[in-house]
Image (spheres, grey):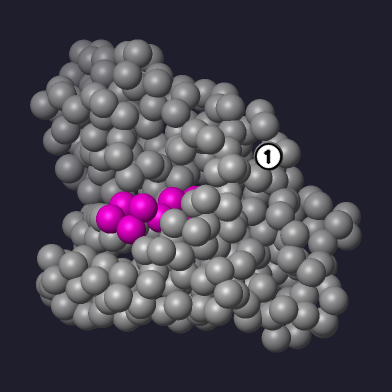
Amino acid sequence: MLAGGDELLIRVATRGSRLAVIQASEVEDRLRRLGYSTRRVVVESHGDLDRTTPLYKMSVRGIFEKEVDRAVLDGEADIAVHSLKDVPYELPDGLILGAVPKRGAPFDAVTPHPLYLIPPGSRVGTGSIRRMFTLKALRPDLEVEGVRGNIDTRLAKLGRGEFDALITAEVALRRLGVGGWFRLNPSFFVPSPGQGALGVTCRADPPQELAKALRRIDHTRSRVEVEVEREIASKLEGGCTSPLGVYARHLSAGILEVKLSLVKSSGQLLRVSVRGSPQRVVAASTKAFELRGGRLEVGYWRSQTTH
């Protein structure tokens, strides 16, 4: 963090993809509206360079975030902006989640046709093991294929006819200004923990002025929701290697509804829904999930995708 006269300059690290830059710009705009100056630091990540290995088979968790966070730890940037669903539940030593701005749409979406209008035998692409196996459970008549590359690359593949439809995060399509998409029912396509939210990481000992700036862009309700989701997923050891969905939303002040879903090894959907305070829903949803065999199923998927 650099000070020039009375003006505070905050250096913002991000990946270089179009979507990542748009996400970083959202955070920069919020900071500028509060009177801060920003400078962007673009970092190339290993996850962007390897565009063939399925994400759930990569050995490093937080594959897109590691190098970007390194810029913060090395003093090249003051904060890093991430898609929170990709951020490991345990941050690297020396880093904290400094801010969670107001969450965008957390849902999944399909383009260019509604799911019920996609004919049997159609090829549907997605880069998420959760979306892949949920779709297989709900529409076994479709050909579901994995697809790598950033969202622009995936949309280009769709445009070239490599797929008949694409399933991805609604918020990504919104941020890119893409039309012709349709939201998927979150009761079945339960989102990934943190989906739709941005996570701003910083050093664990930020300067006082930087900490103040991050507090001003933090959105309390969004932070509570995503922290509940991430805590539940962490307790269940469900990362990108298992088709686990966890979604929390406020019903009223201090009361959340939490939905969990997992595609079982049998191909059936396991679903749990709990309501209560943030503290209660973490314990209650985890217990209900475990009583229905959810933890064993998460272990099954982890063994399948890591060997």
- Label 1 amino acid? Thr
Q: Is residue 75 left or right of residue 64?
A: left
Q: Nearer the viewer, residue 38 or 146?
A: 146
In the rendered image, residue 240 lying in the magenta stretch gets the answer yes
Q: Is residue 105 visible?
A: no
x, y (%) of residue 123? Answer: 81, 67
Residue at image point 49% right, 34% down = 60
Q: Is residue 151 visible?
A: yes
x, y (%) of residue 174? Answer: 56, 60
Q: Nearer the viewer, residue 287 or 146?
A: 287
x, y (%) of residue 239? Answer: 44, 51
Residue under numbered circle 1: 53
Q: Quadrant of the C terminus?
A: top right
Q: Quadrant of the N terminus?
A: top left
Which of the 4 image quarters holds residue 183?
bottom right
| Segment tinted magenta in the rendering | 234-242
Can you say whether 238 is above or below 73 in the image?
below
Can you say whether 116 is above or below 167 in the image?
below
In the rendered image, residue 89 lying in the magenta stretch gets the answer no
Which of the 4 image quarters holds residue 253?
bottom left
